Amino acid sequence: MQRKAIFSRKTKETDIKIELDIDGKGEAHASTSIPFLDHLLNNFSKHGLFDLKIRAKGDIEIDQHHLVEDIGICLGEAFKSALGAKLGINRTGYFVFPLDEALAVVSVDISGRAFLNFDCQFKKQKIGDLDSDLIKEFFWGFVRHLEATLHIRILAGENEHHKAESLFKAFGKAMKMACSKDKRILKELPSTKGLI
């Protein structure tokens, strides 16, 4: 079974289309009109080995908030659709990613319950051209729509670019682990409840 999804969402504020192949090779093309966000999403895709195309436009002349949050929403929906019934997946994943002086840890549980613990401090209002406070909003959109629990911490770092990039690389690795299938339980849900 191919675990792919195409998800589109258009509102008065944003217009987003995502194409996702969970079992890809890490081929990424993000075009969001926020180059540093493109950089982070491309790193997520590369390190998760997800083939990912994102085309997104929004009212960034007002603020970046709508666009960044809605991309998180759409990415969560794309993963939810591509995972389908979630049979045989590992469900949980984690990774600690070093990038020079920066160190980020991400742990995810595709549990059917949306929760975010975001313990990350950014000293600058902007990283490149991305409003740094919107990184949290991106992840809130993602967890609400995938219905996953996500814990994120930046354990060390001085350079804001390194901190954000290590975070998204860890996110990719953790999601790769959680979405991977275990051949011993291909027809089962990884839950004692029998439901996710």
Image (cartoon, rainbow, N blue to C red):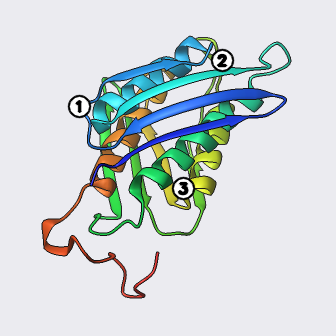
Query: For the point 64% across and 29% down, which residue is it?
Result: 16
Toward which corner of the image does residue 102 lie, by quadrant? top left
Q: Secondary structure at mark 3?
A: helix
Residue, disc 3: 146
> Nearer the N terminus, badge 3 or badge 1?
1
Q: How many marks?
A: 3
Q: Is residue 10 above or below residue 155?
A: above
Cα distance between the residues tagged 3 and 1: 22 Å
Residue, disc 1: 25
Q: Residue furthest front?
A: 1
Q: Secondary structure at mark 2?
A: strand
Amino acid identity at mark 2: Lys
Amino acid identity at mark 3: Leu
Q: Residue furthest left?
A: 184
Q: Is residue 178 above or below residue 187?
A: above
> Nearer the N terminus, badge 2 or badge 3?
2
